[in-house]
Amino acid sequence: MSETQLPSRQVIYNPAAPEFQQNPFPSLRHLREYDPVHLTRLGWVLTRYKDCGKVLASRDFGMRGIEDMLRKQVGPGPAFEFIANRFHSYDPPEHTRLRSLVAGAFSARRIQEMRVHIEALAEGFLDQVETDTSFDLVEKFAYPLPSWVITEMLGTPMEERMQLSVWTERILKLQGMPQPDRLTVEEGNAAAKDFMAYMRDLIKVRSSKLGNDLLSALIVAEEQGDRLTAEEIAECVVFLSNAGFSTTRNLIASAVVALLMKREQWELLVNDPSLVGEAVEEALRYDCSLTSTLRFARQETMVGNRKLAPGAAVLCLLNAANRDPERFPDPDRFDIMRTDKKHLAFGGGVHSCLGAPLARLQIGIALSALLRRYPRLRLGTDKIEWRSGMYRGPIRVPVVTN
């Protein structure tokens, strides 16, 4: 069907449907084929790679409008204040200022300096399950590894790691629901309030005794005489904690599921571990954690054959774009030897994911450790249950080691 034809009446975008949450790709394929620039009551939904790439890279789209949408979604309160004020919610020049100050704490040198320690953490978590012939990969490995990495980066006490994770999950659940129920709103607001209060107190303590951690780096960060305020640091850290922990957990688990479901791909890596980097990129393309990202049209503009009004909300479905056959031949095939893997898993443009290098490093380290220690690893179930909401990933991944 051409773009100029009317879309099929059967085209429905319903991310809350249970079948969509478990396997969104058939619905996304249908949407992309029959109505790739699809209007919903929440805004326009894009499923093609070229359209998503254009919107993410264009200065004709930005984040102005996020406050009104959030206010309608979650109402006033601590969660609204946090999400609306994090640097990802701003446009240049304010976004440029905040991101440039934060970027130094995520420099390539700083990330690479963490490699040896992350490798030691990965080995330590696998040591704890060494005698088990079966275990849940998420609980024992994919969850604790990025959780410990982010809390260590912040310099927070390990005994408080679980509380930070609970706050993170509640904020993400609220953020990922178009129409959250009352309990989700209450828990999300309480989590945002408590997390921000915790970070304000920690910033006060750390300011008087700086260390070699991310929080200290943000406190001393300076760009042309400008520095982050304490409130900006707190908002930034809570955002980075939310995004960095959950997405990496999901990506590690999703990568392992994809590799073990396509056994020949796992064997390929066992025989040639140097291909781990290729596997990471294909896993990011094949089943990314951040499934969508939002932008707003700054002016009247065309996307595909549709005219978008100024202020129109545009939802770029990254997991749909990454399986667009116009961009990736045979896109539903998981193939680590695919020659072109230039995916949109980390978004694009000025708002692209700042923590992408750290996520890539952790996924690669995790896969390398599993391949070396468990070359005969296999799934312990035929059915994987997936998380719902904005961040996709397996809830549990039972595996058998022999």
Image (tube, rainbow, N blue to C red):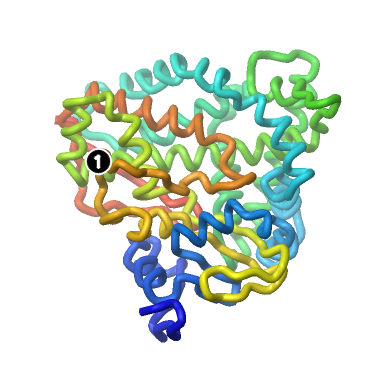
Q: Where, quadrant-wise, is the C terminus in this rendering?
A: top left
Identify whether 24 is placed above or below 249: below
Where is residue 128 drawn, in percent x and y?
33, 22
Q: Quadrant of residue 71?
A: bottom right
Identify whether 4 is placed above or below 53: below
Identify whether 278 is placed above or below 313: above
Determine the residue located farthest toward the right in the rendered image.
Answer: 225
Q: Residue at x 40, y 53 (%)?
A: 322
- Mark 1 is surrounded, within 10 Å at the Cα level, by few (under 14), some (14 to 19) or many (20 or more) other residues, namely many
Could you say which is closer to the camera, residue 114 or residue 385?
114
Could you say which is closer to the camera, residue 393 or residue 159?
393
Q: Is residue 400 visible?
A: no
Q: Is residue 6 left or right of residue 132?
A: right
Where is residue 140 drawn, in percent x and y?
36, 32
Q: Residue at x 73, y 30 (%)?
A: 101
Could you say which is closer to the camera, residue 114 or residue 80?
114
Q: Which residue is mark 1?
A: 259
Q: Amino acid at mark 1?
A: Leu
Where is residue 202 drawn, in percent x and y?
73, 26
Q: Quadrant of residue 337?
A: top left
Q: Is residue 183 left or right of residue 287?
A: right
Q: Residue at x 44, y 75 (%)?
A: 35
Q: Quadrant of residue 298?
A: bottom right
Q: Residue at x 27, y 39 (%)?
A: 336
The image shows a total of numbered marks equal to 1
Where is residue 227 drawn, in percent x and y?
82, 28
Q: Where, quadrant-wise, is the N terminus in this rendering?
A: bottom left
* Mark 1 secondary-structure assignment: helix
Q: Is residue 282 visible?
A: yes
